[in-house]
Amino acid sequence: MEKLYLCFDIMSGISEIEEKQHTESSVKAEDEATYDHIVKYTGFLGGIQVLTLLVGVIRNKLAAVLLNTVGVGLSSLYQNVLNFMQNTSGLGISFSSIKEISEFYGRGDAEAIARHVCVVRTWGVWTGLAGMLLCVLLSPLISFCAFEDFSHSLAICLLSPVVAFMSVTSAELAVLKAVRRLKRVALISVFSALAALFSTIPFYYCWGMRGIVPALLVSSFGVMSVHLYFSVRVYPWKVGLWDKGNFRAGWGMVRLGVPYILANVVNAAVGMGLGLYIARAGSLADVGLYNMGYNLVFMYAGIIFTAVDTDYFPRLSAVGNDTEWMNVVINRQIKVGVLLMSPFLVLFVLAMPIVVRILYSSAFLPMVGMAICASLHLFFKSMTLPVAYISLSKGDALVFFCMEVAYDAFMAVCVMAGYAYGGVLGTGVALALAGGFDWALISFVYGRRYGFRSERGFRSFVISQFFCVVSALALALQPLWSLKVVAGGLILAVSLGLSVWVLRREISVFSNFKQRFFRRK
């Protein structure tokens, strides 16, 4: 294990040397080769996310065998309660702190970075302790709301330290993201998944359902330890729990983070409301199909967006008030997002029945049409997400909150209307329409408010890829497999060819590979 850590430390060390060199130059110089950077880290972080998901699938499978459905459901409810408590008590600092530190990183102000890291860690500890206390005080109410009795109050009290562990974990991860230690972030993701796997299964194996509480405690502590191991080697642990200056310096993060948390609360409430509507207007089976289809599209297929939160947002935050360079950074991110997402979506929708059988079972095949239609939302999201972060990068969290509420309201109306007129399939069409609405709304509002402009040079490419995705979607909805294979293969070839053609012009990966290949010959 020590050799493994040493190997990873060497890799991270190389990355950190390069990043320190970048810090000494201007932000614009750092982003001159950003196409290479975006493609590299989107692929790298997306691949790491796939590996993490695979470890999670193994853990869920073992948990299902050892705990049965009741135990897995109980563990999931506990985890949802803890996540809600941590997100609420954390005040969004784990997200908003990235903006603050990224601005100092962009200016190369090492002293300000170290000082703000101390602020973030201090707030992380205090919000974690507050969340832990809140969890203890509200344990009877939480037990009654979640389980309709008070029998789980003691278990929730015992699990309260998990909230504190999660708060410290989030703070450390935010620090590493803000200072671009992306390889460390990726390694943390893998080791955290492995720590959760090896620290929970023994408890399940020995004690069954009685091992759920200790398993959650030990696994969350293990995940926190992994984060601390990698982060304190970059910035040694330092907090000022009684320093009033740390509290004053952190209020800016709170002002930015609270609207972000409220937007998540609204989104969760809309999700719950739609589930209740579908259950009352239709059946619980339809609720299950809708939720599974939604998760399939937005969780599994959405791994390509991992790099947006991890890599892109810190870079955008470092741009500051330079509108011209902001547009360069955003348009490059959009272009790479469309380049990578379009061929993936073509293959994804064509193979949807096979994907559903592999990840779930044939009982969930009725959701295939819904998931195929909803996949179009991801095409719009690949363009919308980079633009949506402008308000947060500028500290204008209220605008972000209003935009999220407007989208949630439109999406809720669309899904209800879609289900009323088209059943589960109609909800997929509604999600696709909501994605188009979100892109149009954000482009208009952020264009007027922040000066965002999309590049004319790649609009034709985006339109071409859009038609490829829509054609694949229409093809996937028809029943003839022979037509899907032949025509779908042609569409995939066209989409992939367009992306490769643009990539060859914009990034140096292909030319470097060609030079090395012919040099060996």
Image (cartoon, rainbow, N blue to C red):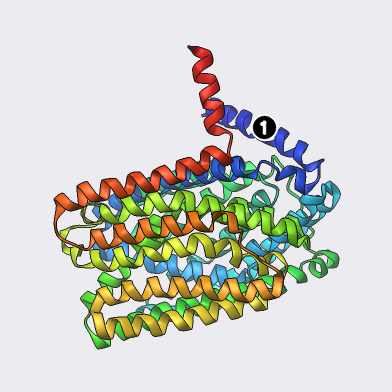
Inspect this view and state whether residue 101 appears. no
Residue 152 is left or right of residue 508, and the answer is left
Residue at image position (59%, 47%) is: 227
Q: How crowded is mark 1: few (under 14 residues within 10 Å), some or many (20 or more)?
A: some
Between residue 210 and residue 198, name the one nearer to us: 198
Element carrying mark 1:
helix
Estimate the x, y position of residue 151 in percent, counting from the top left: 37, 77
Q: Is residue 40 above or below residue 514?
A: below
The percent position of residue 496, horizontal first and vertical second, equals 39, 44
Q: Give the x, y percent position of residue 461.
A: 49, 54
Q: Residue furthest top?
A: 521
Residue drawn at the location 31% of the way across and 59% of the way down: 471
- The x and y percentages for residue 149 are 36, 82
For this view, does 90 lie left or right of residue 362?
A: right
Identify which amino acid the numbered label 1 is placed on: Gly
Q: Which residue is drawn at 36% across and 61% down?
A: 297
**Picture layout, residue 398 above or below residue 235:** below
Closer-to-camera residue (318/82): 318
Residue of label 1:
13
